[in-house]
Amino acid sequence: MRVFTIDGDPRGGNPAPVWLDAEAMTGAEMQSHARASGHESVFVTACSDGVHRWEMRYFVPMHEMEMCGHATIAALWLLHAQDRWDGEPVAIRTASGTVHGRRVDGRIEISQPPACMRLLGEGHIRSIVQCLGLRTSQVVDGVLNASTSRAKTLIRLDSMQTLHALRVNAEQVPIVCERIGSTGLYPYAVSRVEPREVHCSARQFPRASGYLEDPATGIAAAALAWGLRRMALVGPRSAVVTVRQGEAMGSPSQITVRMPAVTQEAEGCWVGGQALLETDWGGQWI
């Protein structure tokens, strides 16, 4: 699957191999499949605990993850395409907790809880600036660690030009992320702010996934939306945050985050987007 595509563009989105009916697979086999594919992969099994319909496990080439947003959407899209799910709200068990899925207006959305956030100090910011090839003056409004399922570091930059001109030190990314307690650096720039709609562009450099940059990251986009509310760029009423990602990689992607009103924040947000079935990989696909 390619997830968070834009208007059916097959170049865009984030690839996600999906294995359904993975009950017979061991964790080691799942890890081996993810390593061979080179992508974040999801393995789906039935769940009979009376609460969740499926359990999903997620692997990148180097390790297992607690949760992966785009892979969850990929799995739900495929289950719906095979008439194994009608799109009604469904509960999924993951290592990070229960995730809810739904189909709205032809798009798959998944739930994410309110983010836990922490401002980083000047020493950490200097390390991030050096890692990304920035000047301190190009960073706006401080730097936040924000987490819905995994901690992402939100770095607001002064322009789109700065965002797309980053000179990232790949060797330093895992070192800096480990130091600041993050699973990925998420620099972004705000392009438009309206009363109930905010548009951003972002890039993600994960700590230890087996590749330098991610073309679309639902968990990071959710964290960003909560960070924007903390900075008052998302107002107190319900709003939509649209995040463009992957453009610097030639893989344009778009993620939508539906934010609740402040009075309903305990309900969390919904992360969604479009998806396509990839037909040009080496494996066998239906």
Image (cartoon, rainbow, N blue to C red):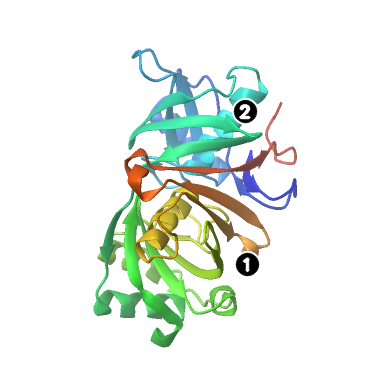
Q: Nearer the viewer, residue 3 or 117?
A: 117
Horizontal and vertical percent for residue 95?
33, 34
Give the left or right position of residue 153, taking residue 201 as reference: left
Circles 1 and 2: CB atoms closer than 8 Å: no
Q: Nearer the viewer, residue 205 or 265?
A: 265
Looking at the image, residue 37 lies above or below residue 26: below
- How many numbered discs? 2
Q: Nearer the viewer, residue 278 or 270?
A: 270
Give the left or right position of residue 276, taking residue 132 as reference: right
Q: Which SS class for mark 1?
A: helix
Q: Which SS class for mark 2?
A: helix
Horizontal and vertical percent for residue 156?
44, 72
- Can residue 44 be seen by looking at this rendering? yes
Tell me the quarter of the image containing the C terminus.
top right
Horizontal and vertical percent for residue 256?
56, 49
Looking at the image, residue 150 lies above or below residue 16: below
Query: Could you tell which of marks 1 and 2 lies nearer the N-terminus?
Result: 2
Q: Which residue is mark 1?
A: 248
Label 2 sits on what residue type? Answer: Leu
Horizontal and vertical percent for residue 103?
58, 30
- Can residue 33 be seen by looking at this rendering? no
Distance CA(mark 1)–CA(mark 2): 28 Å
Residue at figure coordinates x 46%, y 45% from the top left: 60
Q: Which residue is mark 2?
A: 78
